[in-house]
Amino acid sequence: MWLEQLNDRMALTLAVNPSVSGDDAEFGRTVRVFAMGAVAWDWIPDELRLTAGAAWLGRSDIGVVPAAGLEWTPNDDWNVSLILPRPRVSRRLTNTETSETWLYAAGSINGGTFDVRRADGTADELSLTEFQTAVGVDVTNEQFGRAFCEIGAGFGRKLQYERGAEEVTFDPGVVLRMGVTR
């Protein structure tokens, strides 16, 4: 990731993330690359930022998506980030010298494309698409780092092979995600 402050009100973000994925027979056959670029402009410094850019998700089912929107911080306790492809509204619950706790609601496009070997032995790509909404808690602490936990729903869920017209759709599902970073 490269972050460059272009001037006192504009910043450039560029990111590239290569990855490999697949089943046990086809893992690593294809290197997929997520790439994004965006320019952010502080329309009202420390309060309202506009972002315009695009992201290549490295997927067969979805190509380029906008990485655009606005981020509004009316005060230290609220952050409204309406930037696609993952909008998020956050409210700070606690703030001490060593930690912060935030409650948030978010949406996102999830899934990915994976290399697979089909039952007949042919190599193929399988794409999973899912739209998600979630509410969560994010805690940052000087001692342990950052931890989050969120629960939500996945909908518009489908699996699709690259070769052939096969597509499987699924009912909405529950999403539970947790993580810790240091």
Image (spheres, rainbow, N blue to C red):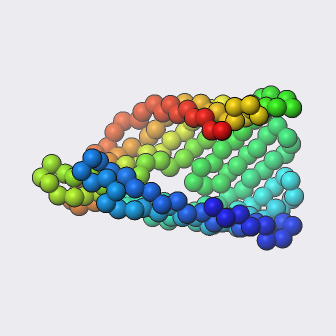
> Which of the two residues, 10 or 107, is positioned nearer the viewer here?
10
* Residue 49, placed above or below residue 138: below
Q: Residue at x 85, y 29 (%)?
A: 96
- Quadrant of the image containing the N terminus: bottom right
**Residue 104 visible at all:** no
> Which of the two residues, 147 or 159, is positioned nearer the viewer here?
147
Q: Position of residue 67 (x, y in %)?
A: 61, 61
> Which of the two residues, 127 or 19, is positioned nearer the viewer here?
19
**Residue 33 visible at all:** yes
Q: Residue at x 15, y 48 (%)?
A: 119
- Quadrant of the image containing the C terminus: top right
* Residue 146, placed above or below residue 52: above
> Which of the two residues, 65 or 123, is positioned nearer the viewer here?
123
Q: Residue at x 79, y 71 (%)?
A: 6
The outermost residue toward the bottom is 6
Left or right side of 159 for 34:
right
Q: Position of residue 30 (x, y in %)?
A: 35, 62
Quadrant in which residue 122 is drawn: bottom left
Left or right side of 135 for 29:
left
Left or right side of 173 for 121:
left
Quadrant in which residue 5 is drawn: bottom right
* Residue 140, placed above or below residue 114: above
The outermost residue toward the left is 120
User: How many marks do you count on the picture?
Assistant: 0
Q: Position of residue 72 (x, y in %)?
A: 78, 50
